[in-house]
Image: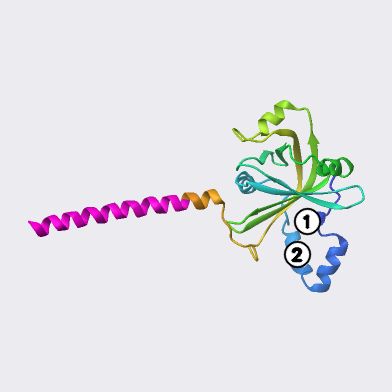
Amino acid sequence: MNAHTFTSDVAFTPTVKAIQTRKGSRKGYASAEERGGWRAHITPDLADFIAGQTSVFLSTANGEGQPYIQHRGGPAGFLKVLDEKTIGFADFSGNRQFITQGNLADNNQAFLFLIDYAHRQRVKIWGTARVVEDDAELLARLMPQDYKARPEQVILFTVSAWDANCPQHIPQRFEAADVAAALAERDKRIESLEQEIARLRGAEDGTAKG
């Protein structure tokens, strides 16, 4: 059960609030808290954002509090919203260190960081996570279609709170596939214009000779 007064208390501890007070930002955040603060459920807008991601950073900590961040990627849609509180994804076989799984066995607190460089958007999601092994039906449900990777298990993330950041300092970068598609469309347009120019010149030359 969440004992926090406000959803953002998952991050705004008394120590954090004391620093905010000392540095002058507490009043603004307190006003946001009173207006409802951060969301505790996955909204349709957040679900759409999650569905478009090809990359995610999953943060965990071991029983001693030592943090660890693991990157996970896949085709758009590899992160799936299962309900208004749950995000799931197939955990593909990697270097087999199993640090994240070990951390979650000792400490289920987790954090997802999603960033869309093209649109300069980022979302922070607090919650808990667990590893699900030996559930072939769930694994098949979460495995991206025709994706060449070996799924090993499932990670289910339960949302406690989330917040979207401003775009400040996010560099604008684009997916290679999107850039290639844009360049292909440009080249196609150039070819079409060159053909039209050649046609017009041919028509002009024919008129001049006539």
Between residue 192 and residue 154, name the one nearer to us.
192
Sooner in the amino-acid sequence: mark 2 or mark 1: 1
Between residue 112 and residue 4, name the one nearer to us.
112
Q: Name the residue at 68% across, 45% down.
A: 42
Kind of residue sitting beneath label 2:
Tyr
Residue 144 in which image quadrant: top right
Q: Is residue 110 above or below residue 131?
A: below
Query: Callout 2: helix, strand or loop?
Result: helix
Query: Callout 1: helix, strand or loop?
Result: helix
Part of the protein shown in magenta:
182-210
Give the farthest residue toward the bottom: 23
Q: Is residue 163 above or below residue 30?
A: above
Q: Give the spatial CA distance, label 2 vs label 1.
A: 9 Å
Label 1 Cα crowd, 10 Å radius (few <14 / some 14-19 / many 20+): many
Q: Name the residue at 86% across, 44% down.
A: 103
Any magenta on residue 208? yes
**Where residue 154 sits: x, y (%)?**
74, 35
**Where residue 159 sits: x, y (%)?**
75, 45
**Where residue 54 sits: x, y (%)?**
63, 46
Indicate the quadrant containing the N terminus: top left, top right, bottom left or bottom right: top right
The residue at which mark 2 appears reads as 29
